[in-house]
Amino acid sequence: MKDLLPKFKNTESVKKILPVHIAVIMDGNRRWAQNKNFPAMFGHREGVQALKKITRYASDIGIKYLTVYAFSTENWNRKKDEVDFLMYLIQEAIQNEFEEMHQNNVKLNVLGFYEDLPKPLPKVLNDAVNKTKNNSGLNLQVAINYGSRAEIVHAVKEIGKKILSNEIKVEDIDAELISANLLTKNIPDPDLLIRTGGEQRISNYLLWQCAYTEFYSTEALWPAFDSNELDKAIEEFNRRHRRFGI
């Protein structure tokens, strides 16, 4: 772990402990734009640039898993022109930023029911996932058309199918089986959940997975969230005493 410390701007306060998995609720794109008298779309575009910088920095300092909330199942209730722009922006970001991510050995995974997204976005996402599947660096999970309650309902249905087909018995159902049927089945639970924009809500994000996750809220709006802000979150994580319910 010592070889990771020089890459932090404030190494003494980090205390040599990195979260294995950081989850982020990227909140504040629209407010950031409004504060500057820009259209909301401009804030979303700047949010993509912030994600690019944080992904690079997280990879550089040795974070193993980074999971970001890009588009929720509830976001479909926004104005159509904003939703259409977000779909376009996600596709543009994958097409324009993907190669650098791939060259940096980042492994991309998509969480959510993205097969239901407008075409050709599902294929664009699948192609990117498949191209990076053998990469061994940072695991970047992007939650798109994701909602934790929908994920849990999906897991229950999958378990129900296995019971009906006699693959398992009702008595076999436990926490491990439920985890194994979630969209995050091959990903460790988050150690740290960061929410930008000052809000204190979890917003239907990784409800099962965050049972023992440390929560950190910052007033920084997502487009202004940078490596210094991530360092602050990690420093706060190091000040916590994790008890895991004990």
Image (spheres, helix red, strand yellow):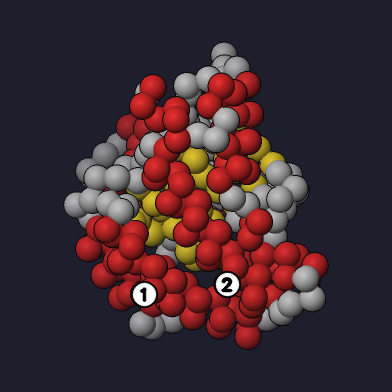
In the depicted structure, whether residue 75 falls above or below residue 26: below
Q: Which residue is painted at 69% across and 75% down in the image?
A: 40
* Residue in the foreground of this view, choosing between 83 and 7: 7
What is the number of callouts on the image? 2
Residue 131 visible in the displayed image: yes
Position in image of residue 97 (x %, y %): 39, 68
Q: CA distance from mark 2 to mark 1?
A: 14 Å
Q: Is residue 40 left or right of residue 184?
A: right
The three-letter amino acid code for the residue at tag 2 is Arg
The amino acid pointed to by label 1 is Gln
Q: Residues within 10 Å of mark 1 (few under 14, many from 20)?
A: few
Task: Write the residue at 39% across / 45% down.
Answer: 59
Location of the N terminus by quadrant is top left
Which residue in the structure is indicated by mark 2?
45
- Image x and y of residue 224, in percent: 66, 56
Label 2: few (<14), some (14–19) or many (≥20) C-alpha neighbours in 10 Å: some
Q: Are marks 2 and 1 in contact (CB under 8 Å)?
A: no
Q: Give the answer, above or below, for where 210 lies relative to 49.
A: above
Residue 122 has which mark? Answer: none
Which residue reaches farthest bottom? 81
Between residue 212 and residue 125, name the one nearer to us.
Answer: 125
Residue farthest along the left direction in this orientation: 134
Mark 1 lies on residue: 95
Q: Nearer the viewer, residue 215 or 209?
A: 215
Q: Percent position (x, y) of residue 94? A: 39, 70
Quadrant assignment for the C terminus: top right
